Amino acid sequence: MHPVAANADLSLVQGVIAQGLEEVTRRFEEQLRSDLPPVQRLVSHIENYRGKMLRPTLVLACGLASLPSLRRSVTPTLLASHITCAAVCEMIHMATLVHDDVLDEADIRRRGQTVNRLHGNEAAVILGDYLLASAYHLCSQLDSQKVALLVAHTSMTLCAGELLQLSHRNDLSLDETTYFEIVDRKTASLVGLSCRLGAQCSDADEDTAARFERFGRKLGIAFQIQDDLLDLTGQTSTLGKPANQDVSAGKLTLPMIHHLACIPPARRAESLLLLESATRSSRSGTGPEAFARLRHSLDSSSSIAHARQTAERLIAEGKTELAQIPDSTARSLLLTMADAVITRTF
Amino acid sequence: MHPVAANADLSLVQGVIAQGLEEVTRRFEEQLRSDLPPVQRLVSHIENYRGKMLRPTLVLACGLASLPSLRRSVTPTLLASHITCAAVCEMIHMATLVHDDVLDEADIRRRGQTVNRLHGNEAAVILGDYLLASAYHLCSQLDSQKVALLVAHTSMTLCAGELLQLSHRNDLSLDETTYFEIVDRKTASLVGLSCRLGAQCSDADEDTAARFERFGRKLGIAFQIQDDLLDLTGQTSTLGKPANQDVSAGKLTLPMIHHLACIPPARRAESLLLLESATRSSRSGTGPEAFARLRHSLDSSSSIAHARQTAERLIAEGKTELAQIPDSTARSLLLTMADAVITRTF
């Protein structure tokens, strides 16, 4: 295709997705609307809590990329089911964010105050439940048992991943296998589902849907590793939330796990001591200083590079999954999105 | 029917329900089972957290009472869908209990330590989410869009009721209208749904299903009023949980609302002061003494009697709903259960 035509095509597809995301937002808001003013006030707060819209964007882009070629070659069109699935995935994601903030006792999320900070933990817990119930209600409107089972099963998996992570809170001997087990369930499952649902709504066969799901799962894990890296190396001002939250919450991330596994025993003992005094639960009051020394120690090992390479490998593997999907502008967009997962700085 | 035959029939129906409840418990456990040991440990804790099984019992009894007369007259038999719906309703109820305990910072529930006390608030929040997701997954196994929409919609209503209640925490001017609005959404909705689902699984027509739902809603409100009364007048040892929790959590219940609305202005001012110092947030340290004086003041008004009469009226109205349902042993059992809601002491 001529480069000018390709660019025109790209902006067409981007336009379809942007318009789709607006419909997703409308669907999202309509579904949550309540006749009770105190409920509606909380719900409105959720609405300006919205972030990257990664999951709905993936539903829509995977939906376009797996439309039958006839439809794809004319004007790419999204179906009502794509919009619904995108809103469902975003709603489940939002519910986990609202509940995570209760768990983390977070004050700031995406440059705004968190629900728990503004309205108390009680409101945040029930608002998260309201989001979950709304997601299932919206999902049931599709009248597809297959989709309903997938959505509910993924929610169970996601919670199981969070519980597994919680059981390893402050576990300084967490290994890479368990780390990946947690991330796969907690993050990759819903990203993978978003991609699968996009394809399924376009009537893709099971092989293609599974391919899109694997693409999403790889992206999801890489996304989490990039989050780990940003938490260590990013700036609060760019991230929109405080940096270095993981260590202080007692969560070992990939760079730290690799670091502890690879350094000689003497340095390992030192790093463990530093880690302990960098956690929020530490009473030594040496948190920031311990964190700086830990960061220095990490820089001198290859652990940050290891995490970066792992994320890059996952993105490459994810892109390979799409190699057998017929070429289209939507597919190119997905490949670009995959790269952006690990180049983003926020 | 001869009394001996009637008794034999009653124990037959009770046996069918008892066996059904065992199946519900198995279904409940199977659905929650996890391959991850830390998740399974938490799930096992939920299992001995189980209480009165009011909602599953209502699903089964309403199911039997609305079976086509041919089937009812032979041996009453429950269908697999009754068992599934009963487990779904109990799972949603359990999720709200687990999350309520986070909200109330409760230490004891049904004579056992609460999940949040044993495993922290974080685990309790996610375990509640896991229960909700499992309930929807189980519900989707039925492949009935109608049931899925009802279950999800009721969950939304229930959360909205809890949020409404929360917005009136420490509101000493809460009126009866708002109180009933809260109770209807928070408690009656799920009890009503349990009765409706029982009937629907027996292929009852919409008129009959709606009748069973209204019966359940009345029962649900009466149940809550009885809880209010027990919280004021019951003993910790009989209740299995601390008494006087409502006032200390800043929740006005029906007797207290009536009391404040009916007493002369001077006594009202005194009661309001006593209420304020009886709440947990009070720093005066006069909680127990204030509570005793409040109790004395309540006893001298007709407010406890008013609440009792309201609950009795609701039970009578609920029973009237079933007057047009064909007579059966299961229906008699439902009428007895209705009476038990307001005669129970725990």
Image (spheres, coloured by chain):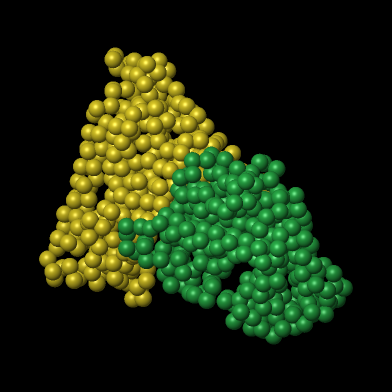
Chain colours: A green, B yellow
In terms of image quadrants, where is residue A297?
bottom right
Quadrant of res A240? bottom right
Give the residue at x 70% y 43%: A207
> Residue A181 in the image: x percent, y percent?
71, 55
Count of picture labels: 0
Residue at 70% x, 63% y: name it.
Answer: A2
Height in image: B194 above or below B174? above
The extreme left residue here reads: B264
- Camera sees residue B192: yes
Left or right, residue A217 beside residue B71:
right
- Please state which of residues B66 and B256 is positioned toward the viewer in this rendering: B66
Q: Which of A319 and B74 is in front in this view?
A: A319
Q: Relative to residue B44, is residue B253 drawn left or right?
A: left
A170 w.r.t. A162: above or below: below
Residue that sits furthest to the right in the current view? A264
Locate residue B170, reporting x and y percent.
Answer: 31, 67
From the viewer's side, name the closer residue of A242 and B227: A242
The quadrant in which the C terminus of chain A is found is: bottom right
Measured as percent of width and height from the top left, residue A10 is found at: 63, 63
Question: Image point 31% across, 42% down: which residue?
Answer: B217
> On the image, which quarter does residue B302 sit in?
bottom left
**Residue A283 visible to an observer of this rendering:** no
- Left or right? Give the position of A223 relative to A46: right
* Quadrant of image for the N terminus of chain A: bottom right
Residue A298 sits above or below residue A144 on the image: below
The spot of residue B204 in percent (x, y) is: 36, 28
Q: Name the residue rendered at 31%, 52% in the picture.
A: B183
